[in-house]
Amino acid sequence: MRVRDNRRGCCIFLKDGDSPRVMYKKRTIGLYLTRICIMRVNRKLCFVVAVLVPMSFFCFHMWTKSDKVVAVWNREAPEDLLDNSPLQPLEKYAGISLKWKSEVLELLPKSNCKCEAETTLDIPFRQELIGKPYAVNFTASMVPLGIDETHKRRELEYKKFLMRSYSPADKIIVAEANSPLQYPLQGVEVRPLKTILIPGLGLLDLKKKQNYEVSLSCTLGTLNVAAEVDSVTIKGAGEKQITLSSSLLDNLNRQLQLVSYSNTVFNPNTADTVQFQSDGHTATFTIKVRHPTIPKLYDMGPTKSKYNISSLVTIATKTFLRYDKLQDLIDSIRKFYPTITIIIADDSEKPQKIEGPFIEHYIMPFRKGWFAGRNLAVSQVSTKYVLWVDDDFIFCPQTKIEKLVDVLEKTSLDLVGGAVREVTGYYTTYRQIINVIPGDKEGDCLKTLQGYHHIIEGFPNCVVADGVVNFFLGRTDKILKVGFDPQLSVVAHLEFFIDGLGALHVGSCDDVVVDHASKIQLPWSKTKTDKEYSKFRYPKSSHAVTSQHKLFYFKNRLKCMTGN
Ligand SMILES: *[C@@H]1O[C@H](CO)[C@@H](O)[C@H](O)[C@H]1NC(C)=O
Ligand SMILES: *[C@@H]1O[C@H](CO)[C@@H](O)[C@H](O)[C@H]1NC(C)=O
C-alpha cells in the first residue's frame, strides 16, 4: 500500500489481488488519510472536503476497477453428444464386412424418443392395484397457447442454458496413437487466477535426436517455469505459449516437471484446454478452473450412542383449511418427539392460531399454493435434516425418524422416503424410476416407472430410487438447492424429483411408517371442511393441468410423458 500526498489529493494503492475485506480496510484508511492531508494542505476545510472526498472516491473506484474484459458467455457450445459416426465407416473401412448386433444397437442412445403407453401384461385388477399405463403429450397442451411462439422462446432459453452449463472439461478428447508425449489425462485443477505446477508432463525418446523441443499453449492463462534447468532454452515464459528445447532429454524432462500454469481470466467453473506438442505430435488436456466447494456443516453436538432427533431434525408441513387433521398430526408427533420443532406453512383464507412449544406457524397469502408452502416451510429449517409430512398424516410407533437419520448419516443419499399406511392397510412407498430419453427439437421424453434401482447394503429394507412418497427425510441444504417450484400450486409431487434428477440421490425405506388419516372417505362422512378442501385441492378445471403441462414443456423441455 502506498500513499501519494500532493496538492490534488491522497490516494491509496489497491492491488488487484486484494480481498474485498482488505480493500474495504484500505478504503477506510484512505478516507482518513485524505482528511489529514486536507488539513495540512488547505485550511479552507469545507471547500476542500466538498471537492476532495468525491474525488478520492472516484480515485479508489478507478484503482479498484480492472480493465480486463472477459466474455463469460463465450464457452464452447457442445457438439452433438450422440455421435453415431462409427456406425457410418470411413471410406478406408467401407469394404470390411461385419454383422450388426441388433440387441446392442437397440440399447444405444438415439435422439428420437416417443411416448406411447406401454402395453404390458393385462392382469385382473391391474388398474386398481398398480395403476394404468399412460402417455401424455405436452405439445398438444401447448397448441391453444400458441405453440410456435412458445417453442421459439423455449429453444432460445435452452440454448442459453447449454452455454451456461457446459464446461470444456466435458468435451471428449482423444489421445492420438503412438505419441511420445506424457501428460495428465484428467484431474488437473486450478483456482481462479491462481497458479499450479502441471503434473505428469514428459517426453519419451522415440528416436535419438540432436535437439528435443516441446511447446505448450493455453487460452485462459499463461505458462511459465518454476525454475530454469541447465542446458534448456526457454521461449515465451509468462505467455500463452511456451517452448522448451534442449539437446539433453533428461534436462528437458526435468524442466517439464517444473512447468507452471497461471489462470489469468477470471471465469470460474470452466476449463482451459492445453495443447502439448513436439515434433508433429499433439496432445490435448484440460485444466479445470474452479473455486473449492465451500462445505456447509451442521454441528450435531457431543457424540452419543443415540441421535438427538430434536437437534437434528425439523418437521415441516403445509396446511390448508384442515386444522382438525393438523392438530391430530401435532398431537401424534408430541407423543413420540416432545421437543422436535414443527414448522407449518398455512395459506388458508382465515388462518387459525396454532400454538404450542416448538411450533412455528407461518401464514401465507390465501391459496398461495402447495409447493410455495413447501418452499417456505423448508426455507425456515435450521437443522441438518428436514422431515416432510402432509398435514393429514399421523405418527405411530413405527414412525422412527432415527432409522431414516441413520440411513442418511451412513450413506451418501440426500433424501430417504418412508412408507405411508393407508386406511385400507395398504402401504404406499411410491418408488419411481425417472428416465429422460433424448428427443428432438420438440423436446425430450419423460418416462416414469414404478420400481427402484437396487437395495442398499446394510439396510435390507431400503432401496435407491429417483422419486419417493410425500413422507421423506432430506438434507436441508440439498432440498433447498433443488427447491419446490412455487408455480406448481395444486397437484404436484413428482415434479420435485424431476427437478432434482441428477442433483438428489434418493432412497426409500419401507420399515418407517406413518399413517394416512384420510383420502378414502365415504361421500356422506365428509365434513364441510373436507368438501371445501377438495374443491381447492382437486379442481375440476383444466387450468391446473395445462399449467403443469406448460412447466413440463417449457421449464423441463419435455414433449411428452409416459408412466405406469
Ligand atoms: C403431440 O401432439 C402434437 C400436436 O397434436 C404433434 O404434432 C406431436 O407429434 C405429438 N408429439 C408426440 C411426442 O406424440
Ligand atoms: C437434544 O437437543 C436439544 C436441542 O438442541 C437440546 O435441548 C437437548 O438437551 C438435547 N438432548 C440431549 C439428550 O442431549
Image (tube, rainbow, N blue to C red):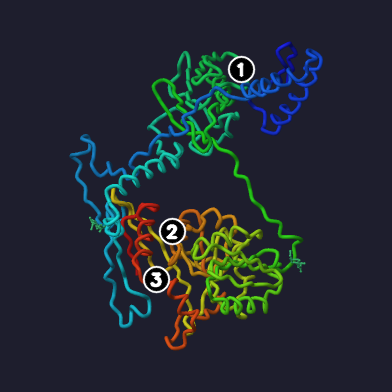
Disc 1, ligand 2: is the CB inside 8 Å? no
Amino acid residing under circle 3: Pro
User: Mark 3 or mark 2: which is in front?
Assistant: 3
Q: Which numbered tag is attached to residue 228?
A: 1
Mark with earlier residue (3, 2) = 2
Amino acid residing under circle 2: Ile
Q: Secondary structure at mark 3?
A: loop
Q: Which of the 4 image quadrants contains residue 97?
A: top left
How far apart in space, not on screen, are marks 3 and 1 (Cα)? 76 Å
Residue 22 in the image, given as x and y percentages of width and height: 71, 30
User: Mark 3 or mark 1: which is in front?
Assistant: 3
How far apart in space, not on screen, are marks 3 and 2 (Cα)? 23 Å
Q: Which of the 4 image quadrants contains residue 170?
A: top left
Q: Is residue 130 left or right of residue 374?
A: left
| Quadrant location of the N terminus in the rendered image | top right
Residue 389 in the image, given as x and y percentages of width and height: 56, 70
Q: Which numbered tag is attached to residue 498?
A: 2
- 556 w.r.t. 322: above or below: above
Residue 460 in view here: no
Residue contact at pointers 2 and 1, CB within 8 angstroms = no
Mark with earlier residue (2, 1) = 1
